[in-house]
Image: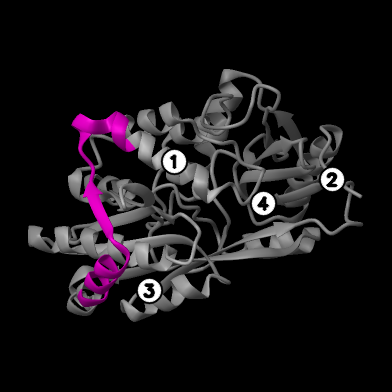
Amino acid sequence: MKIFDVNTSFLKQQFLEFPDVLYRDQPLWTVQLGQDIEQAFSVNVYSRSEKEHAFRWLVYDDLNRPSGRIAAFPNREDGWGAFGFFECVNCQATANLLLSTAEKWLLQNGCKKMLGPLNYNDCVRFWGLLTEGFNKPALYLENYNNSYYEKLIRDYGLIEYETFFACMVSLHEMPLEKLHRVADRFRAMHQITVKQLSFEELEHFARDIHYIYIQCGDPCSRFARLSMKDIADLIHMSQVLIDDNLLWVAYQREIPVGVLAFMPDLNQILRKKLKRERSTVINLNGFVLSAVPDELNFEVEIVLGDAFCTALARTGKNYDLHFCGINKHNNRMISFLTMMNAMITTTHKTFINTPHHGTLH
C-alpha cells in the first residue's frame, strides 16, 4: 500500500474517478461532476485567499489499484484545518493512512485542529459524513458515502463534532393556507415586502443579497467572504437553472433583510438521463435561507417561504422541497419545518480530532 501526492494530470483524473469505481454497483450513487470537485482546489474569489492552498492524496493497494483518496484544507488564521473528499475501501489500515497523512500535513501548515469531512469553499457543498438516510439518492453537491465510513473515522480516533439534518416536504402536503395567514399577519405588522429575482436587475439584487450576507456575519471564520461581484457572478452562472420563482429577497421599509433561493436538483436530472428515475416530481434543493439576525428573522423567513410556495403552487407542478444543512440545535427551524409537515431524510456529521490525538496536539 502506497500513498501519492496528487500532483500530475493523471493522478488528478484518478482522484476524480475513484468514487465512480467505488460506487459503480450502487444505484443510489450519482456521478459527481469533476468541475464541482476541482473548484474546491482552485484559489479564487469563491474559496481561500492566495495565502492558502489545499492538498490531496491517493492510496494504491498492493495490486496497484486506487483504494482511497483524501484532501486537506488549511486555515492558518484560526488554527483550523479540514479534511474532505474522503473515499475509502472498507479497510481500516487504508483509512488510517489517509487520515494520518492529512493530519500531519495540516500540522506542518500551521493547524492545530482537524475537522471533517468538509471543504472550505462554503458550508453546504460536500459537507459532512452521511450517517443516516442511505436509502435515498444524494442531492446535488450533497455527500453520499458507504455506511462503513463512520466506523473507519471513529476507529481512527476522531470524535463527533456537529450534526446536520436534511428535510423534505412535498408542496402539496404543506398547509399553505395556514402559512399564508401567518405570513399576511407578519407582512402587515412589520412592513415586510418581497421581490422575486429579475435577471434584468441582477446588479441590484446582488447588492441587496450582499448587504444581507454581510449583516448576517460569518459565524465561522474558516470561510472566506464573498464580494458583491462574487454573488452577481454566482447568480449569473446559475441562470440556466434558476428562474424567477426560485430566488426571493425580503425588505423591511426598503432595507434588505432576508433572502431565499432554491435550485433544481442536478442529480435528479442526471438520474433521469441515465434512466434510473422516471418520477414526474421535481426536486428543488434549498441552498439559501437567511435573514438579518434580529427579533424579526423568523417572521422574515415565514414571509419569504410563503411567497416562494405560493409562486410554485401557481405552476400546477409537483415539487418536493429539500432543506439541507440544518444544525440539530436549530430548534426554531426544525419546529417550523415540522409544522410544514417536513420529515428528516438524511443525517450528516462532522468529526474532529481530540486535543491529544495523533499528530495535532
Specify the farthest residue to the top: 8
Q: Nearer the viewer, residue 198 or 169?
A: 198
Judge whether 333 appears above or below 39 on screen.
below
Q: Which residue corresponds to mark 4? A: 116
Q: Secondary structure at mark 3?
A: helix
Residue type at mark 4 is Gly
Q: Which residue corresponds to mark 2? A: 112
Q: Tell me if mark 2 has few (under 14), some (14-19) or many (20+) residues whose alpha carbon lies within 10 angstroms of its own.
A: many
Q: Tell me if mark 3 has few (under 14), some (14-19) or many (20+) residues whose alpha carbon lies within 10 angstroms of its own.
A: some
Q: Residue at x 36, y 30 (%)?
A: 232
Residue type at mark 3 is Leu
Residue 178 on image: x %, y %: 22, 79
Report whether 63 appears left or right of 307. Answer: right
Rounded to the nearest angstrom, the CA distance separating label 4 from label 2 is 14 Å
Main SS of residues in magenta: helix
The magenta segment is 181-205
Choose mark 2 or mark 3, whichever is in front. Answer: 3
Rounded to the nearest angstrom, the CA distance separating label 3 from label 4 is 27 Å
